[in-house]
Amino acid sequence: MKQLNNNQLAFCEEYVKNGFNGAKAYRNVYEQENKQVCASEAYKMLRDPRIQEEINNVLLSFRVVGFEVGIDRKVIMEAIKRMMSATKPLAKDGEVISEVPDWQAINNAINTYAKLTGDFATEKKDVLVTGVVGTEDVKNMTPEERREYKDALLREL
């Protein structure tokens, strides 16, 4: 099996470091500014079994280093708990007048908690609905059929 090159190895590490954002990892490693190219190339890379194996190796090494410096689940959960009540100063004319909730930090804490615990994880399911107005393919309709279809949709609402 062909070895990964330095950029591919860097992509794997960047992917784990930035929270599993493939497009961002690709952009940082390959210095590509086009977001669509980054997303497309990252998608291709993430389908490569060699890349997946290296990502697992990076995850394992990060976990080992974290344990070595004292970062474990309890430490992480305590940090998340503190973030849930994060505040930031509210200033007027350069003077702090009060503290307000830091909603961005709180939202990040909630998302991180949900990812770590699997809470709120949903499985994507494809659902096929037939016999209901709203499921027809309008691309193949004549203008008259489209008008009738629109009227039927409006009646159903």
Image: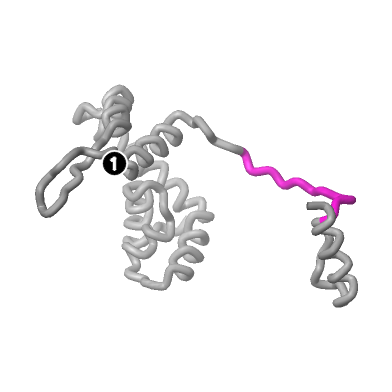
Task: Answer whether residue 131 is magenta in the image.
Answer: yes
The one nearer the camera, 119 or 135, is 135
The reply to whether the magenta stretch includes residue 46 is no
**Residue picked out by circle 1:** 102
Q: Few, some or many C-alpha atoms within 10 Å of disc 1 (few <14, some 14-19, many ≥20)? A: some
Q: Is residue 88 above or below residue 69?
A: below
Which quarter of the figure has residue 153? Answer: bottom right
Residue 147 at x, y percent in the picture = 85, 71
Residue at image location 52% in from the left, 61% down from the top:
44
Residue 20 location (% of width, % of height): 41, 48
Specify the farthest residue to the top: 74
Number of numbered discs: 1
User: Which of the pair 28/105 is nearer the observer?
Assistant: 105
Task: Say left or right for 92 vs 155.
Answer: left
For this rendering, which residue is in front, 154 or 56?
A: 154
Q: Amino acid at mark 1?
A: Asp
**Residue at point 25%, 39% (across, down):** 100
Q: Where does residue 74 sit, x and y in percent of width and height?
A: 30, 22
What residue span does the magenta drawing correspond to?
Answer: 123-133
Q: Position of residue 143 (x, y in %)?
A: 85, 77
Q: Is 73 drawn above or below residue 153 in the view shown? A: above
Q: Characterize the magenta stretch by its predominant secondary structure.
A: loop
Q: Give the left or right position of residue 111, taking residue 85 as reference.
A: right
